[in-house]
């Protein structure tokens, strides 16, 4: 297994279960319900989850368990988080993160002006 950012590239279903506090049957069921959740399978046919898959699982768990969405409602919310025109994923950012992004954008515009004269 290769290492990315000090972590593993792929995680087994049992590792994901211990990270998320969910049972394997819940993850398998969610795979059948949420098209965004499609972990790869390794040569042995076992699920191989990536960080992206784990983020999706945590998001589904938050929608269902904390925000009390139904499965159809959570599906709609997840598919609605994609921007129709651009295909870009919208991110829910804390206000402090938005400020940081604005600062970076301002600095990049300044650099662009210097480069283009």
Image (cartoon, grey):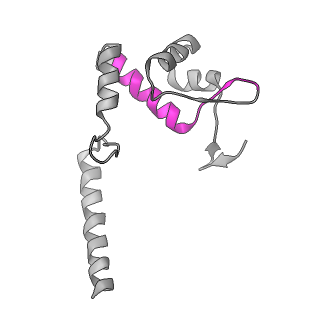
The residue at the point 67 percent across, 47 percent down is 3
Numbered-mark total? 0
Instruction: Report the residue that reaches farthest toward the top.
Output: 25
Left or right, 38 with respect to 60, comes to right
Q: Look at the magenta stretch and give its main secondary structure.
A: helix
Q: Give the vertical position of 100 relative to 11 (above or below).
A: below
Instruction: Report the residue that reaches farthest toward the right.
Output: 44
Left or right, 23 with respect to 43, comes to left
Left or right, 39 with respect to 55, comes to right
Residue 112 in which image quadrant: bottom left
Inspect the magenta stretch and tell me whether residue 46 lies in it: yes
**Which stretch is magenta?**
44-64
x then y, percent, for residue 114: 29, 84
Which of the two residues, 85 or 54, is positioned nearer the viewer here? Answer: 85
Inspect the magenta stretch and tell me whether residue 82 lies in it: no
Q: Give the vertical position of 114 relative to 60 (above or below).
A: below
Q: Quadrant of the C terminus?
A: bottom left
Instruction: Report the residue that reaches farthest toward the front.
Output: 85
The residue at the point 31 percent across, 71 percent down is 108
Q: Give the vertical position of 21 relative to 95 (above or below).
A: above
Which of the two residues, 103 or 40, is positioned nearer the viewer here? Answer: 40
Residue 35 in which image quadrant: top left
Left or right, 47 with respect to 85, comes to right
x then y, percent, for residue 83: 28, 41
x then y, percent, for residue 32: 49, 16
The residue at the point 23 percent across, 47 percent down is 95
x then y, percent, for residue 50: 57, 36
The residue at the point 32 percent across, 38 percent down is 82
Residue 67 in which image quadrant: top left
Q: Quadrant of the N terminus?
A: top right
């Amino acid at each position: 297994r290769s290492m990315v950012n000090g972590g593993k590239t792929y995680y087994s279903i049992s590792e994901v279960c211990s990270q998320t506090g969910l049972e394997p049957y819940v993850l398998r069921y969610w795979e059948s319900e949420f098209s965004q959740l499609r972990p790869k399978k390794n040569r042995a046919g076992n699920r191989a989850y990536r960080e992206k898959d784990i983020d999706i699982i945590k998001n589904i768990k938050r929608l269902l368990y904390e925000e009390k969405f139904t499965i159809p409602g959570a599906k709609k919310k997840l598919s609605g988080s994609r921007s129709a025109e651009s295909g870009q994923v919208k991110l829910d950012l804390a206000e402090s993160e938005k400020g940081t992004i604005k600062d970076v954008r301002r600095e990049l515009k300044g650099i662009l002006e210097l480069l283009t004269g």
